[in-house]
């Protein structure tokens, strides 16, 4: 059996030696579009994080199993894979804790202005005529926190926000989630009422451009808006307070977000703690082990 990893650089320094027990393993740090077919055409099992596996690749190869090394599955033509009898698995739940953690890292930095205060101490505090330095910042307690997408990550964020004393509400992007612990709102109501809005939804037909020029103006001017889902969930015409994902990744050098001093940006890392990456590989290994067991 031949196993091919197409973009392990995206996984960092994880150990993959355990996969050798399943057969011949080929590992590529990155794979360009024009390189994909040549690398997978004789493979039985293909591992991809973001490399696209489309209809053409499936038609011209012997792939039997595609393991997506992520939760999102939009880089694989799932409908055609089903037609071809190719099994496709993702890995869910491995990064819940870290996505929630980064969500609060954004919020706490924005509300507490730690970087600004650190710079103030380093450059100006020694010249102050008082013991402190007063600017306007706020507490989380009592704030209205709206969550878009109440899956595993959204629920984790809701629990932590509640512990901080926030009033949590949510909008279900699928329309299927119902949770009696939190107030369920229509999207427009959530946008209008929330002091903090965080997005934890997948990219699909329900969420593509979910926030756009028609509803972004409903958000309070002083509200904090965080996108930890997918870049395409928000139309590019919006203003954001915290952004981990972008419509194009890596980000374009002329992206207007880069010019704003009021926005926090991270390079799509709200999944990539050491613990999350180790769990991702472990769960992918279990998927292959179960496949071989039938």
Image (cartoon, rainbow, N blue to C red):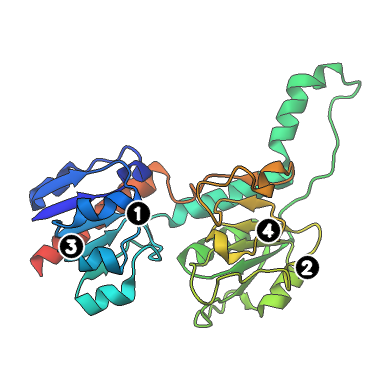
**Residue 49 circle label:** 1
Residue that numbered label 2 is attached to: 217
Front-most of 114 and 160?
A: 114
Q: Is residue 78 above or below residue 197?
A: below
Q: Is residue 226 above or below residue 73?
A: above
**Residue 11 image position (x, y, % from top left):** 35, 44
Residue under the image location 55 percent in, 76 percent down: 173
Residue that numbered label 4 is attached to: 225
Q: CA distance from mark 2 to mark 3?
A: 48 Å
The kind of secondary structure element at disc 1 is loop
**Residue 276 image position (x, y, % from top left):** 38, 49
Between discs 4 and 1, the one toward the N terminus: 1
Residue that numbered label 3 is attached to: 61
Q: In the rendered view, does 103 fall on the left or right side of 12?
A: right
Q: CA distance from mark 1 to mark 3?
A: 19 Å
Quarter of the figure with the C terminus: bottom left
Residue under the image location 80 percent in, 57 percent down: 222
Which mark lies nearer to you, 4 or 3?
3
Q: In the rendered view, does 272 fall on the left or right side of 53?
A: right
């Amino acid at each position: 059996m031949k196993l091919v990893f197409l973009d392990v650089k995206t996984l960092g320094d994880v150990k993959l030696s355990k996969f050798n027990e399943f057969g011949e393993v080929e590992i590529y740090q990155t794979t360009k579009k024009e390189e994909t077919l040549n690398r997978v055409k004789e493979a039985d099992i293909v591992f991809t994080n973001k490399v696209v596996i489309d209809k053409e690749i499936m038609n011209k190869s012997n792939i039997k199993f595609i393991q997506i090394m992520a939760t999102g599955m939009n880089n694989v033509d799932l409908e055609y894979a089903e037609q071809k009898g190719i099994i496709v698995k993702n890995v869910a739940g491995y990064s819940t804790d870290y996505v929630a953690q980064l969500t609060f890292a954004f919020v706490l930095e924005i509300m507490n202005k730690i970087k600004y205060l650190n710079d103030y101490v380093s450059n100006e505090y020694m010249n102050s005529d008082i013991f402190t330095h007063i600017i306007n910042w706020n507490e989380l307690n009592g704030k209205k926190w709206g969550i878009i997408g109440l899956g595993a990550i959204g629920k984790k964020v809701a629990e932590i926000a509640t512990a901080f004393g926030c009033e949590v509400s949510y909008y279900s992007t699928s329309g299927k989630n119902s949770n009696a612990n939190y107030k369920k709102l229509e999207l427009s109501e959530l946008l209008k009422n929330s002091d903090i809005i965080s997005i934890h939804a997948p990219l699909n037909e329900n969420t593509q451009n979910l926030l756009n020029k028609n509803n972004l103006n409903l958000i309070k001017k002083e509200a904090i808006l965080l996108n930890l889902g997918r870049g395409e969930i928000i139309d590019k015409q919006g203003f954001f307070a915290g952004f981990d994902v972008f419509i194009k990744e890596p980000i374009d050098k002329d992206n207007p977000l880069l010019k704003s001093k009021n926005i926090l940006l991270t390079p799509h890392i709200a999944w990539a703690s050491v613990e999350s990456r180790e769990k991702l590989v472990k769960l992918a290994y279990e998927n292959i082990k179960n496949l071989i067991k039938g």
